Image (cartoon, rainbow, N blue to C red):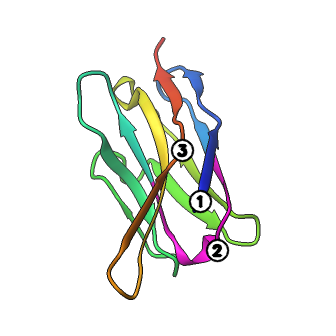
Amino acid sequence: QVQLVESGGGLVQPGGSLRLSCAASGSIFSIYAMGWYRQAPGKQRELVAAITSGGSTNYADSVWGRFTISRDNAKNMVCLQMNSLKPEDTAVYYCNAHRRSIDNTVYDYWGQGTQVTVSS
């Protein structure tokens, strides 16, 4: 079991920056792949960025070059640095922990979400 708590959301003007943090507890953080997802009103939840247990990253095309995901296994934390924010980045952002066990059981845990609003 993993508990995830996001922080760092808020209101920012277009072109601004925000840094989201996700603190994890309850299990061995380092074995999980971590991701940030977002869901805008009326839209499906989508993957924004992910980082594997080994540190490999991938990003949605829409945020590539603007967002950076990172993790600190010593602090059980994953962060999302968001630069050059656009109004279309407005959404609730969710932290996710994911792993597949040796017997192929999938474990997925979610935080409660944090609102990011990009508006002038």
Give the CA distance from mark 1 to mark 2.
8 Å
Start and end of the magenta stretch?
Answer: 21-35
Q: Residues within 10 Å of mark 2 (few under 14, many from 20)?
A: few
Quick one: label 3 or label 1, which is nearer the N terminus? 1
Look at the picture and state if 53 lies above or below 19.
below
Residue tagged 3: 111
Q: Residues within 10 Å of mark 1 (few under 14, many from 20)?
A: some
Q: What amino acid is at disc 1?
A: Val
Q: What amino acid is at disc 3?
A: Gly
In this rendering, position of residue 72 left or right of residue 70: right
The part of the image, by quadrant, that contains residue 88 is top left
Residue tagged 2: 28
Residue drawn at x 64%, y 74% is: 28
- The residue nearer to you, when weighing 31 against 19, is 31
Q: Are marks 3 and 1 in contact (CB under 8 Å)?
A: no
User: Which quadrant of the rendered structure holds the N terminus?
Assistant: bottom right
Circle 3: element type? loop
Q: Is residue 27 magenta?
A: yes
Q: Which mark is residue 2?
A: 1
Give the CA distance from mark 3 to mark 1.
9 Å
